[in-house]
Image: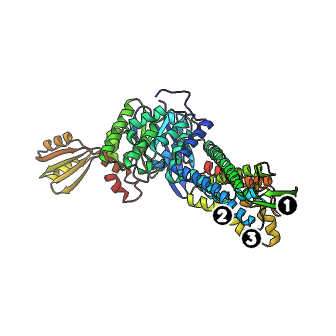
């Protein structure tokens, strides 16, 4: 399969601090790939290196096999939305887009088209400095779509948006992927990725933690836990304990069993004539899977709040 | 998603883009307006005041051309700041990342900004320079004097104070003023590329132009005479004079020396632009 975006041993150091540490991954065409990690995990730095804005300390980033700086028409191959607003506050939305369009010979009609697409036509003549966060984000998306690129690179597109804006981004991402485009979207919100992405690249402290489908990430977090409530908890625990099975007990009559399905537990209980009061399989949520994956990678304790939100 | 082969980045398209950026900011036209007003307005005002003074027997002004171009000493502030802001505001707002995403070959952005600034400032300053000269000389011509001036090129008799474009060195000085303004704008641009921060770049620009001559005054006289004429503003504004002072460079030599400062600043700017993360 052709790699649309490829990072090979990508590393970025700022003095002693390593922001991105030997990161290698491939983003495949035609689907939404989530770039997931807690705040400060190196996602934005990676995005900037992919766009040639930051120079890697070592390693390589390529788009369609070439360095970004070697692309003849970058806006027509990759559309990018960066986290910080990349818009001059004194310029109107239309003039901002016209200036970017001029570099590629893209016409005025396309500028009006993308303004319409993101719903900014009515404020096209207003200066970007007066835009709300949501409007600024829409202008950023309009810039990214200007060259009608196959690949979109979006850094935290839902950050700071109101529910209506978040819904708009979600719908847009899905429709872009449905058109066959490659979408690489970063987020620190697992729940957001669960709704839009099919594949995940998870990073923590600049290192690759997982590169797998959303389903695989969920399973990899230790699978599911089964809650078992019975009067003979300790006798059942002795019967269940085996290789690859762990049993914990929070209350005297309650067991949390990891490594066995509820059917297997039910069978063991029936053979030993133990009456069960409760037998509940609990699917690990994506949120828990993510926290499990990044537990060691979280740089500061407080960053956990950001993930769990 | 149809690949259109006609779409792509070229140097001339980057220049076109920079022109869109330049003209689509209100601050551009405030700066340009201020520079026009100050250069033409002060040129005429000084001509009137000095002319009146001379007609009343208070001294004489041998370089009437330079007198009518005096306003450019103030106009250079507006033009210099314009040059600085054209790049530092991109860093300040984050626009630079959009610019460099659209054109990752950074030297083309550098070229695009230089061409845009130089072209626009030259046209505007030349218009202002002609207006200041013609307006100033028209005012001076109201005052009739009898004077005989000894210049290095011979004796000149004046019947009236005002001179025409045909006067020795006047046309060159009018172009010199426009070239000096282009240089100041590019010096500002170079400082902006090199320092990125608006305040720092403006401080550097004004330090080079205005503070260096003041510092040089503290030097021993012998050194002062050797050094002062090579300072950016002193050298550059020699291009606006028709009469060469004893410790001054000639018009073209002065503009040439000033041009070296501009090239150095822009060179450092390009080095920083290409080397540092955006």
Q: Earlier in the sequence, mark 1 or mark 2?
A: 1
Asked whether the beta carbons under mark 3 and mark 1 sit within 8 Å of each other, the answer is: no
Nearer mark to the viewer, of 2 and 3: 3
Residue at mark 3: chain: B
Residue at image point 81% right, 59% down = B244
Asked whether the beta carbons under mark 2 and mark 3 sit within 8 Å of each other, the answer is: no
What residue would you read off at disc 3? B217
Residue at mark 2: chain: B
Nearer mark to the viewer, of 1 and 2: 1
**Residue B20's spot in the image, x, y percent?**
55, 42
The residues bearing labels 3 and 1 have C-alpha atoms spaced at a distance of 33 Å
Q: Secondary structure at mark 2?
A: helix
Q: Secondary structure at mark 1?
A: strand
Instruction: Residue B209: name its quadrant.
Output: bottom right
Residue at image point 49% right, 49% down = A88
Nearer mark to the viewer, of 3 and 1: 1
Q: Residue B148 has which mark?
A: 1
Depth check, front residue: B192 or B240? B240
Asked whether the beta carbons under mark 1 and mark 2 sit within 8 Å of each other, the answer is: no
For the residue carrying disc 1, how many other residues have a C-alpha within 10 Å: few (<14), some (14-19), or many (20+)? few
Q: Secondary structure at mark 3?
A: loop
Depth check, front residue: A87 or B185? B185
């Amino acid at each position: 399969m052709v790699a649309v975006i490829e990072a090979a041993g990508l590393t970025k150091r700022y003095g002693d601090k390593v922001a991105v540490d030997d990161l290698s991954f491939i983003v495949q065409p035609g689907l939404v790939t989530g770039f997931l990690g807690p705040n400060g995990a190196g996602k934005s730095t990676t995005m900037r290196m992919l766009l040639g804005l930051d120079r890697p300390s070592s390693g390589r980033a390529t788009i369609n096999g070439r360095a970004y700086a070697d692309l003849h028409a970058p806006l027509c191959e990759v559309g990018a939305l960066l986290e910080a607003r990349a818009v001059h506050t004194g310029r109107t939305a239309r003039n901002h887009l016209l200036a970017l369009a001029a570099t590629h010979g893209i016409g005025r009609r396309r500028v009006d088209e993308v303004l319409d697409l993101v719903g900014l036509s009515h404020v096209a003549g207003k200066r970007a400095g007066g835009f709300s966060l949501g409007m600024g984000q829409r202008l950023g998306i309009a810039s990214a779509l200007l060259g009608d690129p196959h690949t979109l690179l979006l850094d935290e597109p839902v950050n700071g948006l109101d529910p209506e804006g978040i819904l708009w981004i979600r719908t847009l991402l899905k429709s872009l992927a449905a058109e066959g485009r490659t979408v690489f979207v970063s987020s620190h919100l697992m729940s957001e990725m669960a709704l839009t992405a099919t594949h995940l690249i998870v990073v923590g402290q600049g290192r690759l933690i997982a590169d797998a489908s959303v389903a695989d990430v969920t399973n990899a977090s230790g699978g599911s836990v089964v809650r078992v409530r019975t009067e003979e908890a300790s006798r059942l625990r002795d019967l269940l304990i085996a290789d690859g099975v762990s049993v914990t007990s929070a209350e005297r009559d309650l067991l949390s069993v990891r490594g066995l399905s509820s059917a297997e537990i039910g069978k063991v209980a029936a053979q030993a004539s133990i009456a069960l009061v409760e037998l509940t399989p609990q699917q690990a949520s994506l949120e828990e899977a993510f926290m499990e994956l990044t537990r060691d990678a979280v740089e500061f304790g407080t960053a956990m709040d950001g993930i769990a939100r | 998603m149809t690949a259109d082969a006609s779409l792509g980045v070229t140097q001339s398209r980057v220049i076109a883009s920079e022109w869109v950026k330049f003209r689509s900011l209100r601050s551009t036209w405030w700066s340009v307006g201020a520079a026009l007003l100050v250069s033409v307005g002060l040129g005429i005002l000084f001509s009137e005041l000095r002319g009146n003074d001379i007609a009343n027997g208070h001294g004489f002004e041998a370089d009437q051309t330079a007198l009518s171009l005096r306003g450019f000493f103030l106009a250079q502030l507006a033009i210099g700041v314009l040059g600085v802001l054209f790049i530092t505001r991109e860093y300040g707002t984050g626009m630079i990342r959009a610019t460099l995403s659209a054109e990752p070959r950074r030297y083309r952005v550098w070229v695009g900004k230089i061409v845009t600034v130089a072209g626009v400032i030259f046209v505007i300053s030349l218009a202002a320079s002609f207006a200041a000269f013609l307006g100033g000389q028209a005012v001076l011509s109201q005052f009739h004097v009898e004077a005989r001036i000894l210049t290095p090129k011979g004796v000149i008799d004046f019947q009236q104070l005002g001179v025409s474009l045909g006067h020795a060195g006047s046309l060159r000085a009018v172009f010199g003023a426009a070239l000096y303004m282009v240089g100041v704008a590019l010096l500002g641009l170079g400082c902006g590329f090199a320092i990125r921060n608006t305040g720092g770049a403006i401080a550097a620009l004004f330090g080079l132009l205005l503070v260096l001559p003041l510092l040089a005054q503290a030097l021993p006289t012998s050194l002062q005479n050797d050094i002062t004429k090579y300072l950016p503003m002193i050298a550059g504004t020699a291009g606006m004079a028709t009469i060469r002072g004893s410790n001054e460079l000639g018009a073209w030599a002065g503009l040439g020396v000033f041009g070296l400062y501009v090239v150095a600043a822009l060179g450092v700017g390009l080095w920083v632009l290409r080397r540092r993360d955006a």
